[in-house]
């Protein structure tokens, strides 16, 4: 009997599917007729590596039904499409060689990986510190942060070329001489925006903090200077307290507990931190939706059946193992690494919803124990399945029986699971990880993400209708919707708890309980209130260390990053609702300025008009118009003005528009304008907006955000003064001996 067609739990789920995961032709014509067609496509693609695909496709298809198993978004979007895409979410790139050639070879690899949509992680500890001698060129090194700025610009360029928003992780060891500058980097709100930052904290450092001992900063065997360990620890904590970064990775614990400690050394993670990976390591993710597995929800008999969880885990592991063979990779080194170890990361989502449905309050000892029990079942089922796959298809190529059986994670497994491993080996070196599930959780009906608590019981979302009207829809948490389906308007039980109700220690308790049964790591953010004291904040990280976590990331609302979301309670019994910005109303008249700029490669000037509105005594940009006689620019200037104006009218801090425009690099090359290099015509427009914001007092300082100086307005005459020197920007360029030669700096380029 055929299963009933899959239905969406909420309108937002169908929207997410149609926008992100539904297979379409280049012109937008759908190829996936419905969600069931998407599931069929994925099941067929992941069954293809089997000796008998038809025998496994029904089981794979059943696992996807009702959103019980959720492959990562890259798999849902790419599997079975025939497109040259990777099904792996992210990668840790190769070790950065401490030479100019090695650094820029690594940059090229990063660009190729980001171009295919993969997030990347890098350890910059291998680059010599700022001021160190560079032998052979009589120069001082600029240090790892200067090259991170180059990576940051590259990632912005890839993003501006039409790809999804780039994601990168940068790590630096706690004993690197530039660690203090790394820790303070995010104090600049415009710097390293494409990076998440984490400090690699070692066991000796934590001991030095406890002992209040001195801590040497070393590179290449040379001690550059010494400081107190607690002084550095406090600097890390203060930076994280003030602007939410850097995170902390307990790197020695990660390496000591790694199943593959005999074959690799880890120094970085993927962008969200749930996958510590070696050079060229690849991140393959999928999640079991615990919220869909609860039987007899909201009763005293509510539970997740161990047998059902075991069976679903077994199918999911087999599907994910097949992804290793079905996927393409941006670089051959990534393919080689993935196939040598067949590392996968099966995790969970909807855990907080499942706890609420079982009558357990997230963060309590009982909830932590139940969560650990579910994850223990998953771990044993995953390893047992991998052992059976090894008997059928062979172990991963780098399998070492003695080392694997002695690994701490394997030692924690049930005796019968260890017996299977001893008899057959393992198909996959590592098997479990808990990732943030983002839009996949929305696709499944807005289940709670990963092992995070429920953020809000509901929130409002503005929806653009075909006729141009905007309507509001309430998006409920999955478990809340289930409660209302079963119990109508009855008040939510005490088992429902949201982020705002939790103490930091409760977050740590949940993360530590889960880590026991996860062989890789966990992506989790510990939200703390803005008014938490610094001493209490520091204690969160020490507690995470003591309780066995592999890393710690917190978020405290602050002046640099702001508050990610805010929830405003309604009536005492009503759900919390996330309030989104509504557009500002347009007055009948506005004042503004018109600016003229000349782009050297364009025949006609651009005229940029920025109109302002006054709110609370301050002028702020409200709308923008870009006009030119050059019809080549017409379509994109109209689109640009509409998008930027829409952002301006939303209110809030809109200065990021300047940052984003000025980061756009034209692959055909930029231009020198009045002695300054501007990477694209869009960056020039960003510079004009920046100058206007400064002139009206919306931005302070001589220049605003962005990696490049503001693009100056060209001279008022219609004719440009002539070609500019690409070296110094001077207009004193003339032809000499067949070459364009600059009289100011002597630069020469044959024409």
Image (cartoon, rainbow, N blue to C red):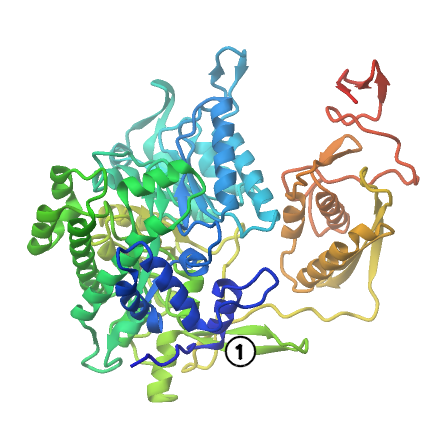
695 or 275, which is in the foreground?
Answer: 275
Relative to residue 662, is residue 529 drawn left or right?
Answer: left
User: Which percent across, then down, holds residue 427?
Assistant: 21, 48
In the picture, residue 417 is in which quadrant? bottom left
User: Which percent across, then down, holds residue 656?
Assistant: 63, 51
**Looking at the image, which residue is at 59% across and 65% down?**
28
Residue located beneath label 1 in the image: 473
Relative to residue 13, is residue 339 drawn left or right?
Answer: left
User: Which percent across, then down, holds residue 333?
Assistant: 38, 36
**Looking at the image, which residue is at 76% across and 51% down?**
696
314 or 541, which is in the foreground?
Answer: 314
**Dot 1: what SS?**
strand
Residue 5 in view here:
yes
Q: Quadrant of the C terminus?
A: top right
Q: Quadrant of the N terminus?
A: bottom left
Residue 268 in view here:
no
**Looking at the image, which residue is at 54% across and 50% down?**
560
In the picture, residue 526 is in which quadrant? bottom left
């Amino acid at each position: 009997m055929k299963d009933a067609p899959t239905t969406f739990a909420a309108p937002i789920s169908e929207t997410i599917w149609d926008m992100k995961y539904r297979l379409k032709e280049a012109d937008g014509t759908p190829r996936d007729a419905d969600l069931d067609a998407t599931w069929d496509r994925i099941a067929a693609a992941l069954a293809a590596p089997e000796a008998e695909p038809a025998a496994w496709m029904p089981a794979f298809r059943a696992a996807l039904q009702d959103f019980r198993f959720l492959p990562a978004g890259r798999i849902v979007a790419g599997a079975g499409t025939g497109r040259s895409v990777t099904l792996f979410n992210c990668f840790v790139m190769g070790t950065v060689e401490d030479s100019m050639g090695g650094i820029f070879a690594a940059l090229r690899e990063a660009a190729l990986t980001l171009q295919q949509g993969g997030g990347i992680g890098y350890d910059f500890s291998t680059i010599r510190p700022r001021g160190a001698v560079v032998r052979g060129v009589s120069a001082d090194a600029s240090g790892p942060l200067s090259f991170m700025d180059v990576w940051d610009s590259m990632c912005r360029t890839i993003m501006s070329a039409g790809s999804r928003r780039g994601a990168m992780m940068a790590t630096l060891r706690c004993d690197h001489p530039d660690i203090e500058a790394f820790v303070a980097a995010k104090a600049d709100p415009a710097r390293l925006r494409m990076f998440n930052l984490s400090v690699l904290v070692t066991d000796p450092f934590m001991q030095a903090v406890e002992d209040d001992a001195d801590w040497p900063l070393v590179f290449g065997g040379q001690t550059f200077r010494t400081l107190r360990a607690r002084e550095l620890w406090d600097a890390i904590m203060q930076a994280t307290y003030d602007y939410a970064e850097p995170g902390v990775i307990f790197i020695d614990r990660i390496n000591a507990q790694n199943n593959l400690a005999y074959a690799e050394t880890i120094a970085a993670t993927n962008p969200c931190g749930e996958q510590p990976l070696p050079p060229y390591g690849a991140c393959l993710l999928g999640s079991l939706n615990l919220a869909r597995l609860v039987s007899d929800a909201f009763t005293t008999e509510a539970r997740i059946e161990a047998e059902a969880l075991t069976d679903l885990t077994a199918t999911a592991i087999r599907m994910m193992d097949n992804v290793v063979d079905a996927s393409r990779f941006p670089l051959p080194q990534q393919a080689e690494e993935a196939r040598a170890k067949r590392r996968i990361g099966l995790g969970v989502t909807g855990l907080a919803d499942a706890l609420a449905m079982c009558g357990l309050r997230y963060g309590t000892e009982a909830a932590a124990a139940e969560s650990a029990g579910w994850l223990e079942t998953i771990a044993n089922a995953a390893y047992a399945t991998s052992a059976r796959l090894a008997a059928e298809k062979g172990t991963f190529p780098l399998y070492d029986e003695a080392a694997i059986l002695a690994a701490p994670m394997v030692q924690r497994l049930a005796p019968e699971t260890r017996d299977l491993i001893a008899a057959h080996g393992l198909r996959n070196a590592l098997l479990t990880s808990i990732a943030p599930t983002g839009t996949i959780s929305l696709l499944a009906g807005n289940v709670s993400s990963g092992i995070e608590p429920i953020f809000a019981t509901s929130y409002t979302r503005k929806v653009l209708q075909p006729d141009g009207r905007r309507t509001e829809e309430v998006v409920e948490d999955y478990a809340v919707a289930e409660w209302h389906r079963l119990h109508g308007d009855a008040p939510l039980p005490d088992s429902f708890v949201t982020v705002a109700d939790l103490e930091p220690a409760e977050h740590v308790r949940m993360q530590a309980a889960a880590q026991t049964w996860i062989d890789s790591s966990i992506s989790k953010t510990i939200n703390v209130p803005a008014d938490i004291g610094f001493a209490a904040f520091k204690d969160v990280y020490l507690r995470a260390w003591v309780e066995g976590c592999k890393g710690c990331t917190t978020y405290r609302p602050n002046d640099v990053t702001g508050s990610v979301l805010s929830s405003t309670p309604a009536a005492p019994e009503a759900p919390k609702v996330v309030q989104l910005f509504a557009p500002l109303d347009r007055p009948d008249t506005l004042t503004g300025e018109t600016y003229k700029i000349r782009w050297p490669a364009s025949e006609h000037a651009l005229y940029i008009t920025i109109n302002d509105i006054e709110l609370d005594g301050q002028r702020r940009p409200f709308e923008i118009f870009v006009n030119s006689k050059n019809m080549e620019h017409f379509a994109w200037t109209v689109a640009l003005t509409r998008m930027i104006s829409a952002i301006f009218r939303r209110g809030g801090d809109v200065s990021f528009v300047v940052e984003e425009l000025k980061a756009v690099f034209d692959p055909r090359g930029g231009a020198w304008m009045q002695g300054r290099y501007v990477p694209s015509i869009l960056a020039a427009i960003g510079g004009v907006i920046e100058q206007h914001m400064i002139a009206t007092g919306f931005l302070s300082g001589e220049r605003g955000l962005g990696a490049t100086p503001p693009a100056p307005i060209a001279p008022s005459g219609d004719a440009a003064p002539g070609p500019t020197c690409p070296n110094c920007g001077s207009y004193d360029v003339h032809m000499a001996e067949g070459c364009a030669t600059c009289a100011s700096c002597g630069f020469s380029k044959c024409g």
